[in-house]
Image (cartoon, helix red, strand yellow):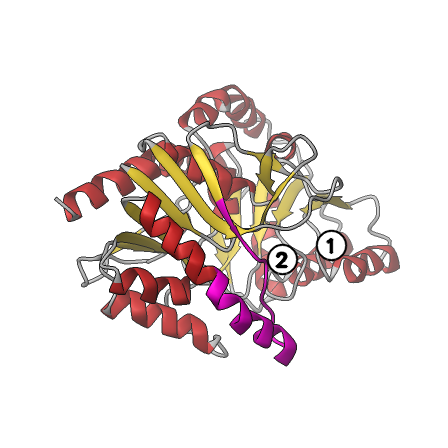
Amino acid sequence: MRLGIVTDCVHFKNSDGKVGTETHILLKQLESLAVYFKTVTICCPFTEYDKDVVASYYSLNNIEFVPVPNVGGNSFFEKLTLLKTIPKWWRAFKKMDRITDLVYQRFPNNLNIPGFFYFYFKKKKVFATYTGTWNNYKREPVTYRFQKKMLQKYFRGPVWAYLEHDSPNDRIHKGFSPSYHQSVWDEESEFVNKRLEKLYHPSPKDLKLISVGTFNKNKNQQLILDACLILKKKDIPFTLTLVGDGPLKKTYEQFIKANNLETAIFIAGKKTAEELRLLYRKNDFVVQAPIREGFGKVPIEGFFHGLVPVLSNVSLAKSITLNGQRGFVFKSDSVTDLVTICTEIYQNKYSLSNVILAGREFAKSQTLESWALEYVNTVQQFYR
């Protein structure tokens, strides 16, 4: 079969004509899915190439692209531009309908709202993923709730969402967002064994923490920084590596400098997948403090490397950590709660080797291979 994919993930062509994106994990997912299809056509926005971006590039020969303009935003002018772009999107959808047998739509985004109606009235075979928070939340954009309602009531095909429990709607499936191949799990076994050996030495050690994500209010790295300041005052040795970039980078840099934390907290910037793997190996705990989260990719990546997640109690955090068996959760608005957990870990109050092994076992079910195969088998059965 020929697969079409509609996504708002921004792409570009480099000077050699290779197509790439900064969304490294999505590229891996789409290539894993492409293995099962004769051709894959990705309809997505394209921008000018910037040589300074940290990019990943497609390597499979059966993937091609239908570019659309990169538009969006909240201002009146940006919304007006969005409306003017719909005819171009419509022409792209028409082409996708002509050259594909099945369309995969990734929600939520502006592009797939008209895309939903186009392929609905064309009676196209479709399936979808909703990559945001499935449960409604305070101050959620109206367009997000609208898209969830469309998927629940009117979408023709299977839908995957980040659910804590199975849905009563047999068309809505509990899904996850993979980052790694099975081969990565195998490759990391040596490093995980070394990590486990280290745990048997009872002498006090630094808490080696890592947090990965865009520096913005929702990812809430400030709460982690505040907790680290208290750890310093309690004379608990630690290091924190912040991986990413974003609007709050300067604020975080100023906080680190003002509190003399330069020797304990490091801003690593954006990293490729391979660079991030090396950082995971050097650390022991993944600390994430989002205010809301669809699916936490970072703690799952941590499991592959034998890291222990310490997560704010939002969305799927308790499910990911299995209520303490695979990691720890803290109150999402409580610096004190995070400090307490870190302090207890430092004081050896938990059997971390059991936690690590449980996380590693769980990671086996979270590979790119298992994700792609589940999608393909489910879609084939649905349209049988």
User: Where residue 263 appears, x then y in whole percent?
Assistant: 83, 43
- Magenta region includes residue 319: no
Few, some or many residues within 10 Å of mark 1 (<14, 14–19, 20+): few
| In the displayed structure image, the side of residue 354 where residue 58 appears, left or right | right
Q: Distance from label 2 to label 1 (Cα)?
A: 10 Å
Quickly name the residue at label 2: 339
- The number of numbered discs placed on residues in the rendered structure image is 2
130 to 85, vertically: above or below? above
Quickly name the residue at label 1: 234
Q: Earlier in the sequence, mark 2 or mark 1?
A: 1
Q: Secondary structure at mark 2?
A: helix
Q: Which residues are magenta?
A: 66-88
Picture quarter with the C terminus: top left
Write down the quadrant of residue 222 in the picture.
Answer: bottom right
Amino acid type at circle 2 is Val
What's the residue at 48%, 42% (across, down)? 65
What's the residue at 60%, 60% (across, down)? 219
User: Where residue 7 appears, x then y in whole percent?
Assistant: 46, 53
Discs 2, 1 touching: Cβ within 8 Å: yes
| In the displayed structure image, the side of residue 195 where residue 226 appears, left or right | right
- Can residue 184 be seen here? The reply is yes
- Magenta region includes residue 79: yes
In front of the other: 366 or 50: 50
